[in-house]
Image (tube, rainbow, N blue to C red):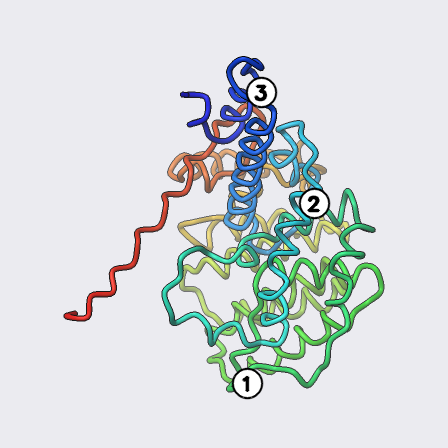
Amino acid sequence: MDALKGYGRAGLRAVQALGAAEIDAQTRKQVLELLLFDHIRACCRRDNAVNPLRLDYAARLDELYSVGQPLDDLLLKLLRDSLADMRQDIDGMRGYYGYGPVREQPFIEYGALAVAALARRNPEALQRELGELARVSQDDRGWWGWGGQRAPATMELAAFFARRGSTALMDKILNDLQSQLRYQDPRWAIVIHVQIAAVQATALGEQASALDRLNSAIRATGLEPDQNQALAHYLRARILMSLNEEGAALHALEESMEASPSPPVLAIVDDAFAPLQAERRYRDVLRFCELRERLLPVSLRPWRKGEPDPEPEPEPEPEDFDDDE
């Protein structure tokens, strides 16, 4: 049956259009659930690629909820199934389990959008299901400084708790990231500085500290084109907009476009810069982003209504453990 081979929103529409004579109720329910899980994962992967700093903006959830189906229970199931991974990630130990054969990318490595969706639309359910993770020990860390970096879903969850007044998990993550800076060449430390600054600005309300950190990190990296510099300038632009420094924000946004061959195309849909719409220079930035966007696969472009569905992820090849190799 061709309808059962569909994917994304088109697959959902095809299955919903089947009559009772073509598919029984139980099969319809199972197929719809599988298609919705695929849809959620595809939306999360796009958000993780387009929005690596997990910045909130008005249209962030539009693609996720474009299917017109209730998703909260499915989002919670994906996060409940990831609890073991999250606990290891919080303890800074997940890096030591990455050397064996990996069949599927863990959801927490790209599932920040699921946390963001529940945080915005059903925060009490998210707190009820995952609130236990807000209570952490500062002593449980990975060895040799590897416990600093955390998965996107863990970072999004820590930001959710921090906005609700529970900062223990975020404090632990920030302490671990700050400790990791001791092992970094200043030219490469910008990766960590940008992550810390994003949290300071979006979850803790520390815009001035975040701005100082970004300015120092950018000076330390020099003038070589770098994707992390582009993200740093983009975050600077957003912070400056929140401080009503629109002229400086526009200049920082332009710098983010010049800092890397792969500029942050998130600007196309980010309403943080809406007050600049009358500015010719801002419209030039958007046109530049749209040109660069054409070079990207559909799954790496910001979603707008009417966009085609990304192609499904290919199934992983089976591992071949040949004793003779």
Mark whose residue sits in front, 3 or 1? 3
Please provide percent x and percent y for residue 312.
Answer: 42, 38
Name which residue type carries label 1: Arg
Q: CA distance from mark 3 to mark 1?
A: 55 Å
**Marking on residue 16:** 3
The local secondary structure at tag 2 comes to helix
Q: Which residue is mark 1?
A: 182
The local secondary structure at tag 1 comes to helix
Residue 179 higher or lower than 225, as above or below = below
Q: CA distance from mark 1 to mark 2?
A: 35 Å
Name which residue type carries label 2: Ala
Q: Which residue is mark 2?
A: 117
Q: Which quadrant of the rendered structure holds the N terminus?
A: top left
Q: Are marks 1 and 2 in contact (CB under 8 Å)?
A: no
Residue in front for this viewpoint, 170 or 38: 38
Q: CA distance from mark 2 to mark 3?
A: 24 Å
First of labels 3, 1 by sequence position? 3
First of labels 2, 3 by sequence position? 3
